Image (spheres, rainbow, N blue to C red):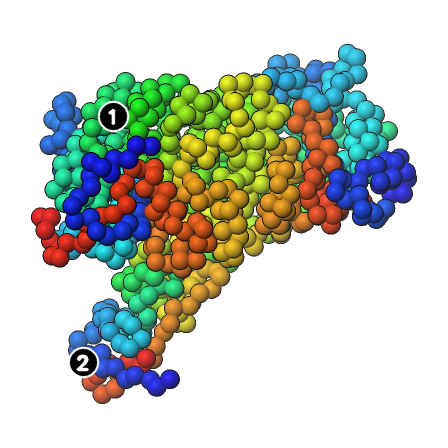
Amino acid sequence: MVSASAALLQQDASVRVSLVDADVHPTARSPEELRGYLAEPWRSRPPQALADGSRQIYFVWGGGQRADAYPAGGGPAGSEPDLMHRQLLEQAGVDFAMLLPIVRHCDNPQFEAALCAATNAWVEDRWLGAYNKHGRYRAAINVCADLPRTAVAEIERWAGNPYFSQVRINTYTEALFGDERYHPIYEAATRHRLPVSVHFAKSTGVSLVSPAGFPRSYFEIHSLLALDYAAHLTSLIMEGVFEKYPDMKFVFIEGGFSWLLPLIWRMDKAWQHLRAEVPWLTQKPSGYVRRNVRFTTQPIEEPEKISDLFRTFDLVGADDILMFSTDYPHWDFDNPKQPIFRRLPKSMREKIMYQSALEVYGLPTHRVPDPPVAGEYN
Amino acid sequence: MSEAIEQAGGTPRDAPRGAAAVTQPTHAPRIDACVYPVVEHANDLKAYMPQPWRSQGIPGPEDYDYIGTGPLYSDAGPAGALIGSDQGRLVTRTCVENGASHVILVPRTRGLLPDLDLSAAVCAATNRWLAEQWLAGPYADRFAGSIRIDPRDPAQAVAEIERWADHPRMVQVAVTTQAQAPYGHRQYYPVWAALDETGLPLVVNVDGGSGIHYPLTVAGSPKYQIEKEVLYPSNFSFHFASMLAEGVFERFPRLRVVFADGGHDFLTPIMWRLHKDWRGNRPDIPWLRRSPFEYLRSNIRFVTNLFAGTPDREAWDFWMELADVGTLLMYGSKYPRWDYVSPQDATAGLRPDWTAAVLGGNAASFYGLA
Amino acid sequence: MAQERVTVCHSDELPAGQRRLVKTSRGVIGVFNINGSYRAVKNVCPHAGAELCLGPISGTTEINANGEIVWTREDRILRCVWHGWEFDLEDGYTLTTPRIRVALFPVTLEGDEVVLYV
C-alpha cells in the first residue's frame, strides 16, 4: 500500500510512533451542529429528523459512554477536542487515532447518504482541520453502502485528502457484504488505496433481529456482535470479493477477534466438501484473511487464563491482522495501559499496538511532540 | 450390551483414528445421539392425524431450505420409499457399521407450518408414528426417541410432553433452532416448567416448523449453502444468551439443552464475550446470577458437526480442551442427511479419553442410557 | 509498613452524599460519606485502571426467591465509570466472578476531622 506519509511528514515530527488507535468516536456537540453541512432538502428538515435519541433501543451503562469523558462545559462525550486530547492522546498515550464518527442506519438511504456527506464535511472541517494541527487524527469517509453510486461519488469527493484514511460502511445493509451491488464501493476504495471498514451504528430495531427473534437485552446483542461480522466476512470471501480485488483491505471494527479462529477452520473444511458451489475461489478461504482482512482489538477478550488468548492470537495470525483500538469515549473503552496489552508476546506486541496500523493506513512512523499548552483548539 | 458389541463387530475396527494404540474398553458405551428417521411415504403421517388436519396439505419431509449442489442424503434408500425410513438399513449403518448400541432418533418437522394448530397436529402425529413404528418395532431396544413439540402454543406443547414423558424410550423433547422469540422469553416458561418437572432435556436443531423464518444470520440472509453451513451452528448462541439473560437455568435448574446443530467450535469465543459482558451489564440482567461458564456442564450439551475441526492436531486439542468436549460433546451421525459424519471423522484429533466420552460416554450419562 | 494518617477535611466539608479525592502515599483515595458513614476506596479500578471513585453509588438489582427483580444494597454499590463493574463497599468485592477486590481503607471521624489511614 502506498504510504500517504510523505504528504503529511511534518518538519518537527520527532516522536517515534508506538501506539495507534484504530477506533475513536468524535461526536458533534448536537445533531444540529451537522445542519450547516447538510444538503437540501435535509438541511430544512425539523430538528427531530436530525436527532437520533429515539433510536436508542438498548440502554447501556453510562449511555454508552465513559462517565468521565463528558466535557465539563457540556455536550456529549467525544465532542470536545481538548478533552479528547487530554484523555486519549496524553493519558492513554495514543500517537495516531482513526476517527470514526458514526452515522446511523436510516430507513431512507438517501437520508443516510446525506448524513454521511454532512458528517464527512464536518470531520474534515473540524477534526481533520481546526483540531488537527498536530496531524495525529485520521478519519474514515462515511458512505451509505445501499446507494453504491452515491457512495462512490462520496469516496471520490474526499479521496484526495490524505487525512481520510479509510471508508466506513454500516453493518445493517440490505445484503451481506459480498453481494455484487457493493462491489463498486470496494473498487473505488481500493483504487484510492483506502481500506473499507465496518462499524456498528444505531439502527432501526428490525436490523437487530437475530435468527431466533428479538433479544431482550444489550447483553445479548453486544456479546454476539461477533456473529454479525462473521456472516459478512464469510460472504465477502465466498462471493469472491478478494479474488476480484486482491489489493483490497477490509477492516472489521469493534466486533471482537477470537471468533475468527473457528470461522476460518469451518470455512476451510466446508470448502473441501462444497467448493463446487464457489468455483471462483482460487485458494482456500482462510488464505484470503491474511492478505485482505484486518480486525481491531477492542473489546479485547478477557479469559481467565491470558495465555489461552495469546495462544488463540498465535493460531489465527494476530500479529499480521490485528490492530489495537480503544473505542474512546465509549463505556467499554480498552485502556492500552492495562496489563493484558503489556503482556502481549513481544513478537506480536509492536505489530498489534502500531505497526500493522501504520501499514494499513499509510501512517508516518513519527509524529510531532505534544503541544506545550492545552486549549489551543477553541 | 455385549450382544450389541458383538453385532457391531467389536471395537478395533471402529476405533477412531489416532487411538489405535489404545484399546477401547469393551464396555464403553457407543451412542449415536442424532439420527433422522423418516416416514416411508410422505403421506403416511396422515394416518396419525385426526380431522381436520388429515385433510390439510402439509409439506414433505425434505429439508426446508436446502440449496446445496450435492444430494440431500448420504445414503441410498429402499426402492419406492423415502431415505431414512428403512429401520434395518439405519441400524446397519449406525449400529453394525459404526458400533452404536443406541441411536437417538430426532424426527424432523414438515416445512415452515405457520398455522400453529396444524404444526401441533403434525408434532402429535410424528410422536405417535415414532412410538408405534420405531420405538415398538423390531429394533426398538436400540432406539431412543425425541418428542416433537411446537413451543408457540405452550398449552399444546405441554400436553404433548405429558402424553409421552413416561414412555420408556422417549428421552428428550425436540424444538427447532428457528423460533419467533429466543428461548429465554417468558412465553415458553410453561414448556420449560414441564421439562424441569420431567427432567427431559430439550434438543434444538435447525429445521422448519417454527412458523417464522428470520434470516439465518443476524446480518442477513446468506446465499450459498457453504455460507449457511459455516454459520448456522453458531446460532445456538442466541438461544443460550437469551436463556442466560432471563435466568432460565436458575428458574428451571433441571432444564438441560442439547444444541444438535453443533457450535462447540464457536463456544469458547462466545463464552469469553458472554462472561465479559455479564461483568459490565449485570444490573440489567440480574437473572443471570452466576458466570455463564457455570451453566455449561450442568445444563448444556452439543452434538458433533461435520465441519468442525482442523488438521492442525495441536491446535484442535487446545481448542477442544477449552470447549470442555470431554464433558459437553456427544457424537451424532446425522444419518441419513448429506452432512452425515462417521465416528472416526467426528473424533479425529481428539484425545482417547475424550473420544470415548464423545462417542457414547457423555450421551450415556446425559440420557441415562446403556 | 507504617500507616500514614491523612486528615481528609473537616466533617462539615464532607456531608452525606458527597465525596472527596485525596492524594496519599498509596495513591489517590476516594473518601465518601454515605448516610453518615465514611468509606475510603482506592481510586483505581482493578479491572482496567479507571478512576473508580468518580462513579455513582447506589443500590442495585437482585432476583428474589420468586424470580422477581428487586432493588437491594441501597447506597452500597460503587459502579465503575468505564465498564460498569459493581463493587460492594461493604467488602470491596465485585458482584460478579471471579471476585476481584478494590482496596478499602479505614476512615473515621476523629473529633471534627475526617481521618484516613493508608
- Tag on residue A155? 1
Residue shown at 72%/28% (left/top)?
B335
Q: Is residue B221 left or right of residue C21?
A: right
- Tag on residue C3? none
Question: The N terminus of chain B appears in which quarter of the rendering?
Answer: top right
Q: Between residues B236 and A245, which one lies in front from this camera angle?
A: A245
* Subunit bearing disc 1: A
Q: Position of residue B333 (x, y in %)?
A: 71, 32
Q: Are marks 1 and 2 on the same chain?
A: no
Residue shown at 32%/60% (left/top)?
C50
For residue A47, above or below residue A26: above
* Residue neighbourhood size for the residue with mark 1, other residues' Cα within 10 Å, grouped as few (<14), some (14–19), many (≥20): many
Residue shown at 48%/42% (left/top)?
A317
Q: Amino acid at mark 1?
A: Ile
Q: Secondary structure at mark 1?
A: helix
- Tag on residue C10? 2
Q: Amino acid at mark 2?
A: His
Which residue is the extreme one toward the top?
B80
* Subunit bearing disc 2: C
Q: Nearer the viewer, mark 1 or mark 2?
A: 1
Q: Between residues B214 and A136, which one lies in front from this camera angle?
A: A136
Q: Between residues A27 and A344, which one lies in front from this camera angle?
A: A344
Q: Is residue A32 left or right of residue B146?
A: left
Q: Is residue C43 visible?
A: yes
The number of numbered badges drawn on the structure is 2
Q: Is residue A255 visible?
A: no
Q: Position of residue B263 (x, y in %)?
A: 58, 39
Q: Secondary structure at mark 2?
A: strand
Question: The C terminus of chain B appears in which quarter of the rendering?
Answer: top right
Residue shown at 51%/32% (left/top)?
A286
* Residue neighbourhood size for the residue with mark 2, other residues' Cα within 10 Å, grouped as few (<14), some (14–19), many (≥20): some
